[in-house]
Amino acid sequence: MDENAVRSADPVLELRDVRMHFGGVVALKGVSASIPRGIIQSVIGPNGAGKTTLLNCVSGLLTPSSGGVVFQGEPVQGKPPHEIARRGMSRTFQHVALFPRMSVRENVMVGRHARTRAGFWASGFRLPFMRTEEARIRSDAEAWLDFVGLGAERDLPAGALPLGKQKILEIARALATDPVLILLDEPAGGLNTRETEELGELLKRIQQKGVTVVLVEHDMNLVMDISDRVLVLHFGQVLACGSPAEIKDNPDVIQAYLGEDWANGGGGPHGRSSDSEKEEMSC
Amino acid sequence: MTHREKASFIALTVFLAVFPWIAGMSRSFGHYIDVMIFAGIFCLVTLGLSLLMGFAGQISLAQAAFFGIGAYGSGILTGHFHWNPWAALLASAGAAAAVAWIVGVPALRLKGHYLAMATLGFGVIVHIVMNEEVDWTGGPSGLGGIPGMSCAGRKISGDAAWFYLVWAFVLAAFLFSRHVLHSRIGRALRAIHDDEKAAEAMGVPVSILKVQVFVYSAVLASVGGSLYAHYVSFLSPGSFDLMWSVRFVLMVVVGGMQSLWGALVGTVLLTFIGNEWLQVFADFEILVYGGILLVMALFVPQGLVVWLDALVRSKARPVSTPSDNGS
Amino acid sequence: MADIFHGAAWLQYALGGVTIGAIYALVALGYNIIYNVTEIINFAQGEFVMLGGLFGVFYYQTCGLPLGAAVLCAVATVGLTGLLLERYVIRRARHATVLSMIIVTIAFSILLKGGAMLAWGKDPYRLPAFSRSGAFLWQGVAVQPQALWVLGISAVVVGVLTVFFRTSFYGKAMLACADNAEAARLVGIPVRTMVLLSFGLSAAVGAVAGAAICPITLMEYDRGALLGLKGFGAAVLGGLGQFYGALVAGIVLGLAESLCAGYVSSGYKDAVALVLLMLALFFKPEGLFGSKEAAGLKRF
């Protein structure tokens, strides 16, 4: 991971006019952004804005119809998800996608797959290097479980955990891949206030480890609390991008979320937008 | 290995060690050794298939074709070209692996069940080749005169010797498969089975692993076929048709897709049924197989081993009696 | 110029190829009907074709019905079998994995084959040609009237199905079910009934093909597998779910097979359709006429 520090001036992720359409439906209409290393970047927007589609295009689940995704200086659009994961990008899913029948520990151990190499034949014959690697995978997984606070539940089947802990487990699994960038799709969905606070603290600890965090979220308290930057997506386009404070007061954003009345001075804090705020936010 | 697994494995080894001796004592049971030899050979096919179906979640309808590649490969190399049988076995397995790779790579890189269709077509093609290439395979009249095998200088002859040879292979394949399942690869396979897209997002190369499992199943089937060729010393295409591929699938479904023990149990059970008790009802064989497969797929999809295991566990738990509630 | 046609071997093969190709096209349509409504591949489709021929023989020879009535009864019986398959087998397995569904339809196909073997034995049977007249010469090649029957019946079936799916309520409802069963249910379409109908219709179409081809080639209990497989090849080659694709692909397959049998090797002719199927799966799984996008959205 040290070699990455040398390139710290370059953005870890660049989106260049990413477009995505499914037959007649246009989900992303040209999204561009540049995400610097080490920040917590939130992506917000009303339902249907294209946030999950964007994550899917970045992580390789979808191939953008056009446009480029550049990760650590290399174009990755159209590459298979496992290849992108190997390069250092990991993610969680909006609807928890754990391996329910495997234990909590085993779920995280799967995360180590791309960083380890014992193959079919080495495993079948139980070669010595495979055995030492297995032991290390196990201890690595347990370390990550301790980091996120799930150490006690190691042996339970993942499907038996309550939703809040499942979401944390998914994050632990994603961290086990040793990512440079982690994409989180609504990690606070379904969590109560206390759990959301703990999630916020966890995300800050992840940032302290040097991992860049991209967070798709609806929980505005969490977003405003921990984000370094916020990108607002609306109808598949970037509506605004800036610091949490700037976004909070942006009338276009308010209009998108709350409707015309608020933006036109009905109930919003600042009424009509002034000229300076109409400048495009660079992201 | 858990204690239960270890105990079961030891019990199995002991049983296999004494079986020929015990069965040989009675004339009426003596020929069961022969049936068990066939069961063992088929177990090699179904062990690989159960990994493919139970963990990679794919179905192959061409296992009989790979079985046939091993059988005809060994038969031709040793019969026509006088190769050493062990070298022929390895060469045939290599051929089966290559073919499986060629079919598997394009079929498995797509989402969905293209492998089912591709193996269906491929299996029938191989069967046609067996029938048509008379110069090599003898065509419908069959290929005879396949020499026997020797191990460490001694010729393998007699049912007892074949029994031990075949089941030694089965135990080795069982252990190898079990080691794979309890390794990084096995975890990846189980992850693919639980949630393929999540597995891929975590860096598991899904398609590559599926191909690896498919190739493994083809290699095992081929080894089984080679042993079969040397045991029966005469091959005909009728033993390698689509119906046989379906029989292998049936064995795995009956025993249980997600359990290696299931593959063994299902195979031995159905080999006995097919060999023994359906001799009387030969006309009903296809109907019965179809019926069993349908019933299992609809009502006991987890297979007999898992079903019985759950049954035994639930009975073992103590049940509270009505008198407890009164006090 | 006329000489290249007159009495030419290739013309003879081509005619035979188009005839059998029409049958493959019908079988492919059967797959497409069920696939369009349910995204299921019915591996038992070939057995419906086989039963169409054998039931035709049953009603004609054993029951003594006139040929036309016998064929109609056969189609109805097999259609009923399709309905039973859906109602008592498929419906039960509806929420199982795709793998289970494949196993279930394969199991049912074996059941049908086993039953046919018990009922009719292993002998091949033949129906008489639908019209009495013998073969006639056209451009110097012998044409069997039954071949014209096959082509004519196929054209009628295709026409009826096209009209049904394009204009009738039930037809359009069936297509809606495939796209989005939930939405279809919400607008009042009885999805279960549509699925049931699709199986019955598909089986009936298969039976028509079986009865029509029976006078030309014989029908026996185990012909279903190969016919089903080749019909499936036509379905994939044409693009799963594509009506006109199935027609074109069926004819192409039949021609390729017939020409191979004539010029290359008759033993390998069955392999031709299968090789084309595999090439289609490997290089263009959405088929000649399917769209990659649509194929990617399907469940199978």
Image (spheres, coloured by chain):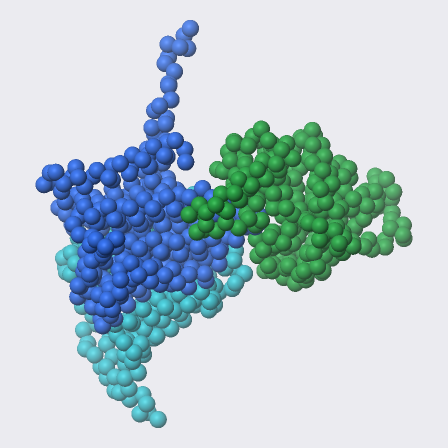
- Quadrant for residue B179, please give it: top left
Q: In this view, does A49 lie to the left or right of B178?
A: right
Please, which residue is most extreme toward the left here? Answer: B27
Q: What residue lies at 17% left-to-right and 52% top-to-bottom?
A: B157
**Which residue is located at x 13 percent, y 46 percent?**
B280
Residue situated furthest bottom in the rendering:
C1
Name the quarter where the N terminus of chain C is drawn.
Answer: bottom left
Quarter of the picture containing the C terminus of chain C is bottom left
Give the image quarter of residue A193: top right
**Is residue B212 in view from this perspective?**
yes
Please identify which colour was used for chain C in the image.
cyan
Which of these two is toward me, A217 or B104? B104
Tell me if C151 is positioned left or right of A113 in this view. Answer: left
Q: Which chain has been coloured blue in this picture?
A: B
Q: Which of the 4 image quadrants contains residue B174?
A: top left
- Position in image of residue C205 (x %, y %): 33, 60
In this rendering, the answer to whether B314 lies above or below B219 is above
